[in-house]
Image (cartoon, rainbow, N blue to C red):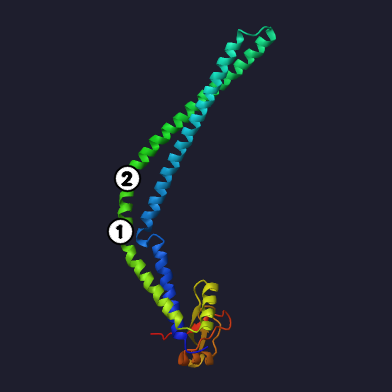
Amino acid sequence: MSGHLETIVSLHKTLIELTAANQRLNSIPEWMSELHEEHSEKKAGIEEVEAAAATADQERREAEAELADAQETQKRYQEQLGQVSTQREYGALLKEIDTTKSQISASEQKALEAAERKEESDAKSAEMREAFSDLDGRYNAELAKWESEKPAVAAAAKQLETSADELRAAVPRNTLVLFDRLYEHCGGEALSRVMKMEVARGNAMWHCAACSYNVRPQILVEIRNEGSVNQCDSCKRILFWEDEE
């Protein structure tokens, strides 16, 4: 494989830029990350309190339904008192009435406590939302600003996609397959720069920047003079040379 290293390097840089552009499109920009974190935290706190209010309200309704059922049962038992014919039946019915009264008392207490929790949560939610309004306004303004910038970022990403496709078309299939496999396997770092390392008496050695494995001088010559596609003997990344300023 030779003569296509420059194109591979350009493709690699283009894909890195494309990845960065797509990440920008799908995330909050750095300049509003602190505001976003604060907004998310405050909003989550409000939602938690409102969820507690909703739970308390649901528990209140359930307790009131239990109370209504118990009161209906008590009424039925009391109507049956005049119909019993034995002392034993009368005593059993009184016991059922006492049990029902306990259920009524427990349901009333449960409904009252749930109503109080909902009232407290509603008051806390209103207080939090009032304090949140200024932050929410600033956040929405910044978010609108970011939304206005997104089209330009999207257009740049589209152009990078087009450039990547054009560069891919200029690379032989076997070289492209190798590059794509390394790009995926190495988390987007398919290439590695050849670095120069000074040794004693003015001599120099070269190594792979990714894994520090030595690069043979002949390989460096092929990379620099012929644009050959060579892999590091250790990490297998495609090696490239970039003149140091």
Say which of 214 and 77 sits in front. Answer: 77
Quadrant where the image shows the C terminus: bottom left
Residue beneath disc 2: 133
The residue shown at (37%, 73%) is 159
In the visual, does 110 lie left or right of 33?
A: right
Q: Earlier in the sequence, mark 1 or mark 2?
A: 2
> Residue 196 at what x, y percent from top left?
48, 86
Residue type at tag 1: Lys
- Name the residue type under label 2: Ser
Circle 1 residue: 145
Q: Nearer the viewer, residue 235 or 15?
A: 15
Compared to 51, does 138 lie above or below?
below
Residue 155 visible, this orientation: yes
Image depth: mark 1 or mark 2 in front:
1
Give the Cα distance between marks 1 and 2: 18 Å
Residue 214 image-quadrant placement = bottom right
Q: Is residue 241 visible?
A: no
Question: How many discs mark residues in the rendered view?
Answer: 2
How busy is the neighbourhood of tag 2: few (under 14 within 10 Å), some, or many (20 plus)? few
Question: Which percent across, then down, holds residue 141?
Answer: 30, 54
Mark 1–mark 2 CB contact (< 8 Å): no
- Expressed as whole percent of the image width and height from the top left, the position of residue 124 reads 39, 37
Q: Position of residue 230 (x, y in %)?
A: 53, 86
Q: Give the label on residue 217, or none.
A: none
Q: With respect to residue 120, does 164 lie above or below? A: below
For label 2, the SS is helix
Quarter occupied by residue 174: bottom right
Q: Residue at x 39, y 63 (%)?
A: 25
Q: Is residue 155 left or right of residue 81?
A: left
At mark 1, the secondary structure is: helix
